Every structure is written in C-alpha cells, then in structure tokens.
Amino acid sequence: MLIPERQSRLQEIIATRGMVDLETLAEELGVSQSTIRRDIDALAQRGLVTRTHGGVIWIGQRSPGGDGAGLRPPYAFDQRIDFQVEAKRKIARAARQLVSANDTILLDGGTTTYYFARELVGQRLQLVTNSLPIADLFLNDEQVELVVVGGLLYPRYGVLLGPTAEHVLETIHTKTLFFSVAGIHEGSLYNQNLLLVQSERRMMKQSQRVVLLADSSKFGQQALARLCDLNEIDTVVTDADLPEAHARRIRAAGCELILAR
C-alpha cells in the first residue's frame, strides 16, 4: 500500500469509527505502531484527531465541507443501517444457525440485530424485543409470537428504554439474548447510552445464553457507558476481518467465537 493510500485509509477508519486503538490500526493497515503514530501526528497537526493513551479519537468535522465530508456520524440507526452491510449480513446468516424452531429469544435494538432479525422472518418463535424497527418486521408474521417491551422511545436508536421497559424485562425469561454494542475494548463492552446499557444488563440476567453480534469495526473502540466484561458473553459472532489479536482475546475470555464468512 502506497503512503498516501495508507494515510487516506487511516483517516477514513478513524473518522468512521470515532475512536480506535493503535494496535488495531497497525494490524489492519499492515504497518508498525510507530508508523501509525507518525501518520496520526500528521492528522493531529491538521486538527482532525487527538491522541489518547494507546489510541486516537476523531475530532474533525463530519458534515459536508470539512475533512470528514461524506462520512456518517456513527451510532444512529438510520445512518448506520448502510454501514458495513456485507459484514452484518454475513454475521446475521451465521447467527441464524444458533436459533431453532420454537425458541424464545430476546433481540436488542441495533442495525446488526436488525439484519439478524430479517433472517428469522417466517420461523416459529417467541420473540421479545425493545426495537420498533425489528418489531415492524414481524407485524404480519403468523409464525412469530411477538412481545414488544414498553417504555420511552429513544429515536436515535429506535428502541424503548426506561422504567417501563425494565419492569417488562424483569418478568420474562428467554433462551438466548442477541445484542450488539458500540465498541469492544481491552476485554470490556461499551455502548453509547446509559439507559440502553441498563436495559442490556437486565436482558443478560433474563437469558440463559448471551450472544454478541458485532462486526470487526467495533473492536478496539470505546463509548460512553461500560456494559460488562467480555467473559460474561457466551458467544461472539463477527466477520472474518477480525484481527487475530482480538480473536485471541475473545477465546482467552472463554467465549465461543464464530467467524462469519
């Protein structure tokens, strides 16, 4: 990879993900961490990023007219539905094999879980969700017994949160929870909203098996609220572009790792 191409790709990765660690960048771009540091220093001089301990955060513009022109801000459902589409579809197809007829499953909101839900249409299931986009997929599906938790609608994610959602979740028990997160960093899982994390912790308690669906771009990232440790997850389903360093961490935490191809 030529130097200008590498630097352009580096800027794109950081701008798209918001926060990335140096190890991930070095592995994905096939260069040393010292080379990545020099490239990041150049971006910092342009006011696009700021260095953190072991990582980098994008601070440049995300709107047209800036160096981040054309890049979508992360974590909004309608903006992320077209991001990493092929990876999410592969993850959805792989996760589909974890569901059997008549299972009772819990689906958290998010774009990756939305693609997964599309794979389940027409299958006989009991399905509980806090996601309006996911619920909408099953409105006319006679094979699915659908339960939608109530609560306060958080439009940025299309999910229902708050005390009402918590109360409903406390009354149910499911075989498997399928969920996603904003980032996985150094053995911890993170999401963007404190209420969402609170609901997800309750979901984990109410499910026999916890399955994380996350494309490889989520690894090496952090977000506002810490959810749990990686060793609290039973199965991780991600795409085959996952760097080997992250794969080792997942297996070391005792999780089953499924690489979708």
Image: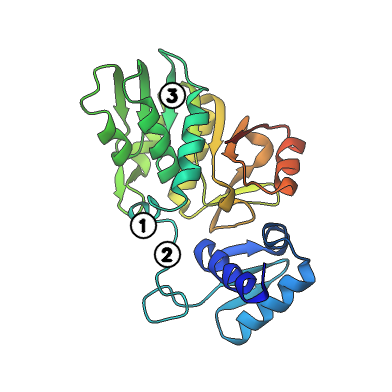
* Residue located farthest toward the left when viewing the structure as drawn: 140
| Residue 139 % position (x, y) | 22, 28
Comparing 42 with 261, the one in front is: 261
| Residue 225 % position (x, y) | 54, 54
Decide: marks 2, 1 in contact (CB < 8 A)?
Answer: yes
Q: Earlier in the sequence, mark 3 or mark 1?
A: 1
Q: Mark 1 falls on what kind of element?
A: helix
Q: Residues within 10 Å of mark 3 (few under 14, many from 20)?
A: many
Q: Residue at x 36, y 44 (%)?
A: 161
Q: Quadrant of the C terminus?
A: top right
Q: Is residue 128 above or below residue 4?
A: above
Q: Earlier in the sequence, mark 2 or mark 1?
A: 2
Q: Residues within 10 Å of mark 1 (few under 14, many from 20)?
A: few
The image quarter in which residue 9 lies: bottom right
* Residue located farthest toward the bottom when viewing the structure as drawn: 45
| Residue 130 % position (x, y) | 35, 37
Q: CA distance from mark 3 to mark 1?
A: 26 Å
Where is mark 1, residue-wise? 79
The image quarter in which residue 249 lies: top right
Q: Amino acid at mark 1?
A: Gln
Mark 3, mark 1: which one is toward the viewer? 1
Q: Residue at x 68, y 77 (%)?
A: 39
Q: Mark 2 falls on what kind of element?
A: loop
The scheme the figure's colours follow is rainbow
Decide: marks 3, 1 in contact (CB < 8 A)?
Answer: no
Q: How many marks?
A: 3
Question: In this image, 131 relative to 205: left or right?
Answer: left
Where is mark 3, residue-wise? 105
Q: Residue at x 39, y 70 (%)?
A: 70
Q: CA distance from mark 2 to mark 3?
A: 30 Å
Q: Is residue 208 above or below residue 72?
A: above
**Where residue 73 is drawn, which disc sits there?**
2
